[in-house]
Image (cartoon, rainbow, N blue to C red):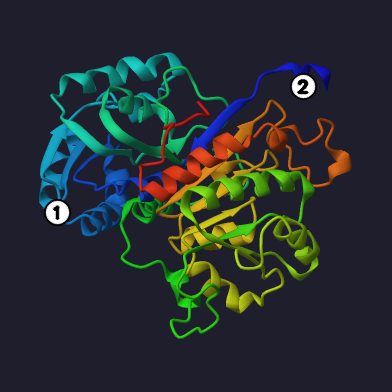
Amino acid sequence: MAEIARKPSVPVAGNVALPARVLSENIVIRRILVVKLDHIGDFFVSVEALCRLRASWPQAHITLICDPTNYDLAQALGIFDDVLKYRFFDEGFEKKNETIYGSEFDPRCAGVAELGLSSYDVAIDLRHDFDTRPCLTYVSATFRVGYAKAGDRPPDAPILDLALAEIPPDGPEQLHAATRVNMLVALMVDTFVTRPMRQISRLVDSTWAGRPFEGRRYMVIAPCARSVNRTWPLQNFVALAKRIVASYDFAIVAVGSATERESAALFCETFTPETCVNLAGTSLPDLPNLVAGASLYIGNDTGGTHLAALLGVPTLCVYGGVSDPRVWQPVGSDVAIVHSRTPCSYCHINVKEDCPHSQRCMSEIDVDRAFKQACRLLGGVNIHENKNPFR
């Protein structure tokens, strides 16, 4: 435990989850590269997924790299702007009953660099098995998509920005090859296709008459969380709120569950009743209406913070080390987290007494860092600072 405590932490800020990053940067997909270098049967079972890809981006320029055997079939589909031939597997490979070993992957993929490829917004390798994945290393792409090899990432493997976990061939649970490729394309579509309206907005009642501070902008602050290990110290929320009020003249609405009303009252007593109101215990159906009208939401890693982010409210999440923000950070068009990735992250320890490091992951997050991110959210600046601080 002492050795872990001595190791440095990594400060993380901005958007680190890929969907949050995509939303915040308003990424438009104009050029797509599809790598499909396997056999005739593999090509046939991928046709549905390939057509869905085209239907999802009808205006994009889509290039396919395929085995020469499948070139005419790919042309006949009529959905690609360019089709390029590339032989990864030797002719007659299956008849030789050979196996390609790790040391052979990279040399077989290196010729992709000689195809004269352009730069792409997304490059996706539709093969489930790992062998063709190093081809993506030789492609200039903003995002790389594919199946991630189980276990440690091999040295010749590209870093995937969006991935599904490979299903080991000897595992008891399996999925059909067509399902696998459809799932990967569905993941890409679900991540990158822009939707005009988030469905969660159905929870907001446009006729709701409970808006606080009529005529004045307000921010919502949720200073509590069910787990102490996910909770930033109350005095930090107070200090941050004071700085924001001094800079932006916001009123404050404190929220939380009914059991957190007392803690919310402690937060509010620093401010005047004209400036701050305690609405902890607000009925859950009213919470979306209250949050949707806010100019800023600040909270811990809790349900209300996810709600605010999904509603498009500028959302600052003070994120602890209990769970991985790449999996659980709030997702929305205007989101930032402040997070200290400690050597003991991600522990999944919610009980205070079980944490051997005195909530180090929360105590290391200072008010200055949080205030900086809040200002960026309020100023409309692109808040994504670190493309991937976890690599």
x and y, in percent, of residue 132 in the image: 35, 29
Q: Residue at x 17, y 57 (%)?
A: 58
| Residue ID for mark 2 | 5
Q: Is residue 251 above or below residue 146?
A: below
Earlier in the chain: of badge 2 and badge 1, it is 2
x and y, in percent, of residue 334 in the image: 42, 52
Q: Residue at x 60, y 49 (%)?
A: 242
| Count of numbered circles on the image | 2
| Residue ID for mark 1 | 59
| Helix, strand or loop status at disc 1 | loop
**Dot 2, how many residues are within 10 Å of its Cα: few (below 14), some (14-19), or many (20+)?**
some
Taking the image as drawn, is residue 177 in sight?
no
Q: Is residue 272 left or right of residue 353?
A: left
Pick the quarter of the image with the N terminus.
top right
Q: Is residue 43 above or below residue 289?
A: above
User: Three-letter amino acid code at disc 1?
Assistant: Gln
Q: Toward the viewer: 225 or 86?
A: 225
